Image: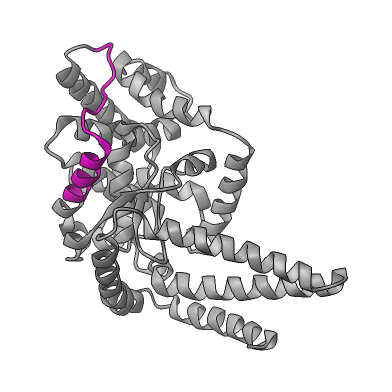
Amino acid sequence: MKLRYWLLLFVFSIVAFNIITSYPQWIETYYTTGFYYYLCKIFNTVTSLLPFSLGDVLYLIVGIFLIYKLYKGIKENKGWKKISMACSSLALKFITVFYILFNLGWGLNNYRPSLESQLEIKRGYDEDQLITLTSKLIKKANLLQLAITKDTLTGVYLKQDIKTILKDSKKGVEQISFLHNIDNTKTLAIKESLFSLPLTYMGFSGYINPFTLEAQVNNKVPTLTLIVTASHELSHQLGFAKESDANFIGFMASYNQEDLAYQYSAIIYALRYCISNINDIESSEVQDLLKTIQPGVKENINENIVFWSEYKNFTDTFFKVFYNSFLKLNNQKEGLQSYNKFVDLLINYDLKNPI
């Protein structure tokens, strides 16, 4: 296939997807609850038979193949002009195939109607509403932490192993299926990533593979965080592409578990986001509120911060910049800040359906 045809295919695919994404309701009806629903069901049935991540293996094979093709292109061509043309040709082909398969396999979910419209809740909040929810979460966290540890000074740590946590996260998502009108929760599957250590250095706690539709978690992260992270990735597998939506469903799935420690994990997860936002408010009321957090709760809030700080390096910054741009290109205009929109969803959902 000549280079100009690859270029035409790339341009055509961009135009086609731009037209399609102009109709969110069409995507919801014919893609998310149609084509994607059946594709996900088939893929999950197949990949769940494997004890390892097929997607991770696929990434490894593609990576080796690209390095080989790049090496071959440089070796077989003489002069910078021919080498540049060979590398550009390889890059165009890779980007075109990636773009088409990514959008057909999962990416169009970024353009479905928003979760708040499905839940029929408003958007936006003021400082008083943020303070009210934060206060509510602090009280709940304090009560749960004391009930679990019988001691206000001791942090909570999950007794379950990773495999149990992943199984329970699936159960949690199944219990809140009323949120999303999708009935394929029974075929959901989640695994530990083979690349957990590299993911840690890159600053990621989990991801959905858009080509095999496998939900995967970084098994290095603190287990208290893992239950919400796993539920977050499973919501991506259900077709909720936006990070704020996945955060919200991850919270709800964990908070609705019977285990008090899982409920506590969800509260700590939400509380971290609220505190991050409330720290921008300079008032004695906020300072007094933060002082009511018990030492054991503070230990759990800081656990995640300490963990990631130990692995922070230049690659973390690079991948955050890259992922920030990637999210913006996929209809999440706030980039990494879209994760924080979870607070917006939680506040307005709580106003309608008190947690």
Residue 132 vs residue 53, the one in the foreground: 53
Is 30 situated above or below 313? Answer: below
Left or right of 287, for residue 158: left
Residue 45 vs residue 265, the one in the foreground: 45
Left or right of 228, for residue 311: right
- Queried whether the magenta region covers residue 166, the answer comes back as yes
Residue 297 vs residue 345, the one in the foreground: 297
Residue that sits furthest to the left in the current view: 258
> Magenta part of the protein: which range?
152-172
Percent across and percent down for residue 212 are 37, 65
Left or right of 152, for residue 75: right
- Queried whether the magenta region covers residue 71, the answer comes back as no
Q: Is residue 59 visible?
A: yes
Percent across and percent down for residue 3 are 69, 84
The quadrant in which residue 304 appears is top left
Residue at screen point 16% across, 42% down: 256
Percent across and percent down for residue 74 are 77, 67
Is 215 situated above or below 159? Answer: below
Quadrant of the image containing the C terminus: top left
Is 269 situated above or below 345? Answer: above
For the rendered model, the colour scheme is one colour
Quadrant of the image containing the N terminus: bottom right
Percent across and percent down for residue 24 are 37, 73
